[in-house]
Amino acid sequence: MPYAVVHHFPGGTKEQYEASIGAVHPSRSALPKGQIFHAAGPSAGGWTITAVHESKESWELFRDGTLMPKMQQGIKGGFATPPQETAFEVYNLQK
C-alpha cells in the first residue's frame, strides 16, 4: 500500500530545499528507489515536501539508508532543523 510522508520545515527556504534535495535524491530527473511522487514548495511559515512511496517499508529504507545519514552528516546550505512530520497510508492515489 502506498505510504505518504509530509515534511514541513518552519522557516525553510527554496535555497535550503535545493541543497537538501541535491544531497538525497539521485538526480533532478529521478526519484529515489521506491518513491513514486514528490512535490515541494513554499507554505505558511516555511517549506513543505510531500513524498509518496510504494510502501511504508520503502519509505523506511529511504529514511534509514539515505535521508537520515545525510542529514546527520550535515548538508551544507540545507535545512537547519528537523521537520514537522505527518505520515499516512494512502487510501487513494491518482496520477
Image (cartoon, rainbow, N blue to C red):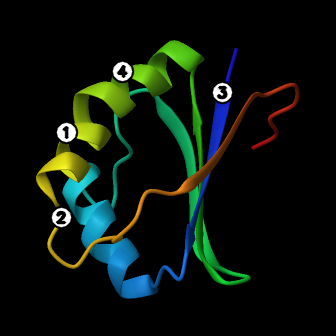
- Label 1 SS: helix
Residue 91 figure quarter? top right
Instruction: Give the camera-side residue of 15 and 80.
Output: 80
Looking at the rendered image, the quarter that the C terminus falls into is top right
In the rendered view, does 29 fall on the left or right side of 93? left
Q: Which residue is mark 1?
A: 69
Q: Residues within 10 Å of mark 1 (few under 14, many from 20)?
A: few
**Toward which corner of the image does residue 94 lie, by quadrant?**
top right
**C-alpha separation, residue under disc 2 versus residue under disc 1:** 10 Å
The mark that comes first in sequence, 2 or 4, is 4
Look at the numbered discs 2 and 4 and tell me whether their residues touch, using CB distance below 8 Å: no
Q: Is residue 52 above or below residue 57?
A: below
**Looking at the rendering, in which quadrant would you find the N terminus?**
top right
Taking 82 as reference, is 21 left or right?
left
Q: Is residue 35 above or below residue 28?
A: above
Pointer 3 or 4: first along the chain: 3
Kindly report which numbered mark, 4 or 1, lies closer to the viewer in this rendering.
Answer: 1
Q: Position of residue 23 (x, y in %)?
A: 20, 58
Residue 89 visible in image: yes
Q: Tell me how far mark 1 sits from mark 3, CA to CA.
A: 21 Å
**Residue 57, percent from left and from top:** 49, 13
Q: Are marks 4 and 1 in contact (CB under 8 Å)?
A: no
Q: Is residue 94 above or below residue 80?
A: above
Q: Is residue 26 visible?
A: no
Q: Amino acid at mark 3?
A: Tyr
Indicate the amino acid at tag 1: Pro
Which residue corresponds to mark 3? Answer: 3
Query: How many other residues sit within 10 Å of disc 3, few (<14), some (14-19) or many (≥20)?
Result: many
- Kindly identify the residue that appears in the image at 25 percent across and 73 percent down: 19
Label 2: state its secondary structure. Answer: loop
| Three-letter amino acid code of the residue under disc 4 | Leu
